[in-house]
Amino acid sequence: MRGRALLLGVCAASLAVGAVVGARIAGRADATTRAAPGSVPAASSGVMPSPDFSAIARRGTPAVVNISALQVYRAERSPFFSDPFFRDFFGQDFPGLRMPLEERKTSLGSGVIVGADGVIVTNNHVIEHAKQIAITTADHRRFRGKLVGTDPVTDIAVVKIEARGLVSLPWGDSARAQVGEYVVAIGNPFQLNQTVTMGIISATGRSNVGIVDYEDFIQTDAAINPGNSGGALLNTRGELIGINTAIYSETGGYQGIGFAVPANLARAVMDQLVSKGRVVRGFIGITKISDVADESALGEVGQGVVVVELLRGSPADRAGVEPGDVVVAVDGRPVQDAAQLRNELAVARVGTEMRFTIRREGRKVEIAIAVEEARGRA
């Protein structure tokens, strides 16, 4: 992992203490005027009232669950290996000093109920290597969770419980998320269930964080801490626009920089895990790309990604893509950097076409590439 990005949710059961804040923004209409959803009307006294997120908290907290996963790891280590005498006498690589041992840990995190049938979305790192998954709902009911599927490269996993009377959250369109927009985070930090915090969207499309392979994060300053992983990030309409995943911190605690997997990506992954049990990714055969080094070659400063390598006989090769081509747009959307292009490729649907706009030796070239299934290729 690069930088100081820390995955959340993998905290020991002994962790305690945290803070609970709840609020919601909502406008009130008088007899002659009507406030837009999520707006804050001016007070008659001329003083702007404080934002109120209580309605969103009431709507969202019943749909956020606590996840406790018993994780078992295999370790090749003899109980004598910690004794300096044995290490010095036999040597550190002596086979007799190594035997398979089991290491057990409890991972604590959050999850979001997105279907009344008990489908729950969380982070892969919350339930990774889990032998048992325990789900506790907001009304204190406990269930054994059944793992539906995981996708480590996006850090999304799906769990299901058999229960009635569940409250689920509606999906929002994360592509509409705006920097500066109010958001509410709900999770279970430090085992403090249904903790609600608020903040704003600090950035969208955040990549190169070093957390997972495919990064297109929503960045927020809403307070999230260990145990929040897999929890909900809501907009002011009470819609799920992200799955809280990680923090960037120098201390391991909250410092105002949190990341959430955008809802559109999480939902696409969930749909495939539910229907197929795995994620089927598209493949076009471009194996290595890099950001543009010589911006003047583009005529558009900072825009474009260089194709460094591609597989012979692959869809991109057959379509006419060549090493050295600069991809400046995909399906009409400008491409700014390599991380963005990787994300475009990650969500490409098998059986469709991707339209690449390429600059080659000063010329603009339009190339349509058929998307095939990435068999055996992550």
Image (spheres, rainbow, N blue to C red):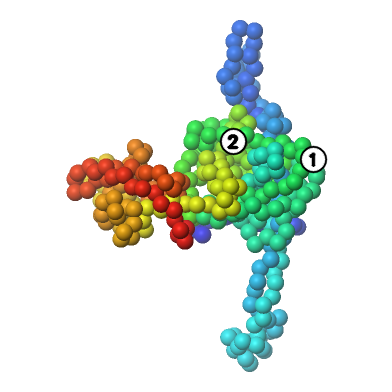
Residue 369 in view of the camera? yes
The amino acid pointed to by label 2 is: Trp
Q: Position of residue 250 (x, y in %)?
A: 56, 54
Element assignment for label 1: loop
Q: Nearer the viewer, mark 2 or mark 1?
A: 2
Residue drawn at 72 percent across, 36 percent down:
167
**Relative horizontal placement of residue 190, taking residue 93 as reference (left or right):** right
Residue drawn at 28 percent across, 45 percent down:
367
The relative height of residue 278 versus residue 51 in the rendered view (above or below) is below
Crowdedness of circle 1 by 10 Å Cα count: few (<14), some, many (20+)? few
Element assignment for label 2: loop
Q: Which quadrant of the view contains residue 152?
A: bottom right
Residue drawn at 19 percent across, 49 percent down:
361
The relative height of residue 273 versus residue 35 in the rendered view (above or below) is below
Q: Position of residue 144 (x, y in %)?
A: 76, 52
The relative height of residue 247 versus residue 300 in the rendered view (above or below) is below
Q: Which numbered disc, 2 or 1, marks the residue that appears first in the sequence?
A: 1
**Relative horizontal placement of residue 267, taking residue 71 as reference (left or right):** left
For marks 2 and 1, give the CA distance: 22 Å
Provide the residue designation for mark 1: 139
**Relative horizontal placement of residue 246, taking residue 369 as reference (left or right):** right
Residue 256 in view of the camera? no
Q: Residue furthest left?
A: 362
Q: Position of residue 106 (x, y in %)?
A: 71, 60
Q: Exactly how many numbered labels are in the figure?
A: 2
Provide the residue designation for mark 2: 171
Q: Which quadrant of the view contains residue 95?
A: bottom right
The amino acid pointed to by label 1 is: Asp
Q: Position of residue 49 (x, y in %)?
A: 64, 22
Pick the front one: 198 or 359: 359
Q: Which mark is residue 96?
A: none
Residue drawn at 63 percent across, 92 percent down:
89
